[in-house]
Amino acid sequence: MVRYGNVVGSRGSVVPLYRQLRPTGILPVTDPRMTRFWIHLDQGVAFVERCLKAMRGGEIFVPKIASMRITDLAAVMAPECKQEVVGIRPGEKLHECLIPNGEARSTREFDEFYVILPPMPRSADQGTDYDGQTGTAVSDGFEYCSDTNGQWLDRAQLQAMLK
């Protein structure tokens, strides 16, 4: 299994909506504090393929990807438009959390991804090495969330992803 953020331009993405609404001069913004993880379709496909080769069974793979602010996306897509705050819908979150702190004790960090190990005991031949790395245990209480992520997309990077 893999967990990753919003896929640029996919069904359900705000990108097609913003393109459609640009001529109106107003783009809806749920909340100016809102953040999301963002991944390009090609990155997502490559990550899934990589995980299929590395998996042992029962793990959850989470790529290390950049976060973005919804207000930055709106500004890049339509700098001439006014951003109108419309409020959070029922069930919607202000920020994405791909690894909540309750999963920290079974999470290992690797150079380009995290692996949440399955709750069942692993046999010795399954190990915890992936792509030739053993990874390191994350600290107790660790979370991987879009608002506290150390990697952010700036406006130029957002523009490049949209092309």
Image (spheres, rainbow, N blue to C red):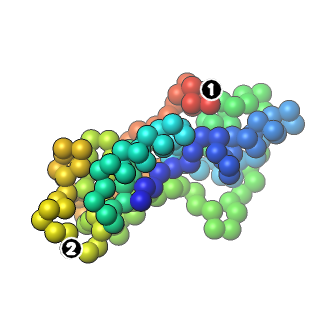
27, 159: nearer the viewer: 159
Q: Which mark is residue 163?
A: 1
Q: Residue at x 35, y 69 (%)?
A: 102
Q: Which mark is residue 14?
A: none
Residue 83 seen by the camera: no
Q: Residue at x 23, y 49 (%)?
A: 130
93, 83: nearer the viewer: 93
Say few, some or many: other residues with alpha carbon within 10 Å of mark 1 (under 14 / 14 to 19 / 20 or more): few
Picture coordinates of residue 98 (x, y %)? 44, 57
Q: Residue at x 53, y 55 (%)?
A: 95
Secondary structure beneath label 1: loop
Say few, some or many: other residues with alpha carbon within 10 Å of mark 2 (under 14 / 14 to 19 / 20 or more): few
Say what amino acid the circle numbered 2 marks.
Answer: Pro
Report how many numbered discs are placed on residues in the image. Answer: 2
Q: Quadrant of residue 75?
A: top right
Q: Is residue 128 left or right of residue 19?
A: left
- CA gap between label 1 and label 2 equals 45 Å
Say what amino acid the circle numbered 1 marks.
Answer: Lys
Mark 1 or 2, which is nearer the eye? 2
Secondary structure beneath label 2: loop
Q: Residue at x 36, y 44 (%)?
A: 50
Residue 153 seen by the camera: yes
Which residue was labeled with disc 2? Answer: 121
Q: Quadrant of the C terminus?
A: top right
Direction bottom: furthest residue: 120
Direction right: furthest residue: 24
Q: Is residue 130 left or right of residue 48?
A: left
**For marks 1 and 2 on the same chain, the one whose residue lies earlier in the sequence:** 2
Q: Is residue 85 above or below residue 156?
A: below
Q: Is residue 54 left or right of residue 145?
A: left
Picture coordinates of residue 92 (x, y %)? 63, 62
